[in-house]
Amino acid sequence: MTTTALETISQTQAEAQIRHLIDDHISAICAKNLDQIMAHYAPEIVIFDMKPPLALRGIDDCHTMWATSLPYMPTISGMETQSVSITISNDLALAHWVARFAGLEPNHPAAQMWLRITSGCQRQGEQWQIIHEHVSVPFAHSNSADCTNA
């Protein structure tokens, strides 16, 4: 099956929209703007975060998690992202990347760790929303490879 020019343009536009969603979500987190953070999630969001509980299901659980977490997050100027990969099929997209907090003192523990992030997104009309998010931190036992570099 060949790809038409129209399909290529549509894929390129969809990828740009997903990249914008990721960037806007990161900006909202950096600003600790709860309303802006929540605007990116679909009502049926499922989140597997790096801290308990194992799963958050639905927008209310998601809101509670962010509302209780934001006061404890360090003040950051941004996030350094690497290896952003986006795969799109019609109204579904999967994006994954690694990121770490920027604007912290170099010896701050949060500046030392990379996060692995995967977001499943769904398009509703012209708007993309996150329907699944998975955030994890690599585990390095004493004899394993370094997990501080992306």
Image: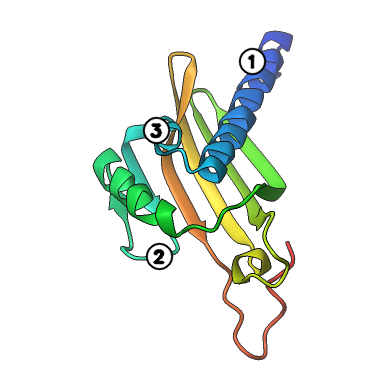
Give me the disc on residue 51.
2
Q: Please tell me how many numbered marks the rendered image carries.
A: 3
Disc 2 residue type? Lys
- SS category of the residue bearing label 3: helix
**Mark 3 touching mark 1, by CB under 8 A?**
no
Write down the residue under mark 1: 10
**Position of residue 89 measured from the top left corner of the image (x, y, whole percent):** 55, 28
| Depth order, front residue of 39/6 | 39
Mark closest to the chain's N terminus, 2 or 1:
1
Residue that carries the numbered disc 3 in the rendered image: 35
Residue found at the very far top of the displayed protein: 6
Q: Nearer the viewer, mark 2 or mark 3?
A: 3
Residue 110 lies left or right of residue 67; in this view the side is: right
Nearest the eye: 129 or 122: 129
Q: Are marks 2 and 1 in contact (CB under 8 Å)?
A: no
Q: Residue at x 65, y 49 (%)?
A: 79
Classify the position of the N terminus by image quarter: top right
